[in-house]
Image: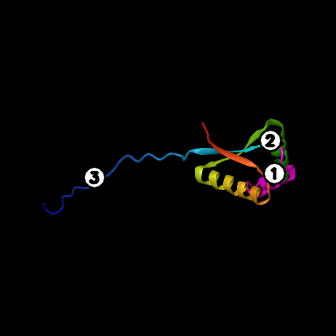
Amino acid sequence: MPQGQSQVRERQDTKLREPRRYKVIIHNDDFTTMEFVVMVLMQVFFLTEENANALMLEVHNAGKAVVGSYTRDIAVSKADKATRLARDNGFPLRLTIEPEL
């Protein structure tokens, strides 16, 4: 091969897009105390006390509520942390993750 020629082709068109978002959903149960749910919402999801209380009441009345929307890794991490905290304290609190549409 003569000097100066190469077999490398450059990609001209790179398409970047936002990563997909996932909703973290907290579910109501009959055993987890309201105070504990508020504490989890404040410590894991960094909600203010006022917002945590409002969301806790929404979960209590509607059966579930969206806590936040995150990239997949962060959503999984936050749901796992909240679930571990609940199990360590003897509560069956359940959080799920769903892709946003």
Could you tell me which residue is drawn at 34 percent across and 50 percent down?
A: 11
Specify start and end residues of the magenta stretch as a single range. 28-47
Q: Earlier in the sequence, mark 1 or mark 2?
A: 1
Question: How many labels, in total?
Answer: 3
Q: Earlier in the sequence, mark 3 or mark 1?
A: 3
Residue 55 in percent (x, y) is at 80, 44
Mark 2: amino acid:
Val
Residue ID for mark 3: 9
Q: Secondary structure at mark 3?
A: loop
Distance from label 3 to label 1 (Cα)? 55 Å
Could you tell me which residue is drawn at 81 percent across and 51 percent down?
A: 37
Classed neighbour count for the residue bearing mark 1: other residues with Cα under 10 Å, few (<14), some (14–19), many (≥20):
many
Mark 1: amino acid:
Val
Residue ID for mark 2: 59
Looking at the image, residue 17 sits to the left or right of residue 58; the answer is left
Q: Disc number at residue 80?
A: none
The answer to which image quadrant residue 28 occupies is: top right
Query: Does the magenta-highlighted stretch encompass residue 101?
Result: no
Could you tell me which residue is drawn at 86 percent across and 52 percent down?
A: 35
Q: Secondary structure at mark 1?
A: helix
Residue 27 in percent (x, y) is at 75, 43
Residue ID for mark 1: 37
Looking at the image, residue 10 sits to the left or right of residue 25; the answer is left
Asked whether the residues under the numbered discs 1 and 2 touch, taking CB atoms below 8 Å apart as contact, a structural biologist would say yes
Residue 63 in percent (x, y) is at 78, 38
> What coloring was used for the rendering?
rainbow
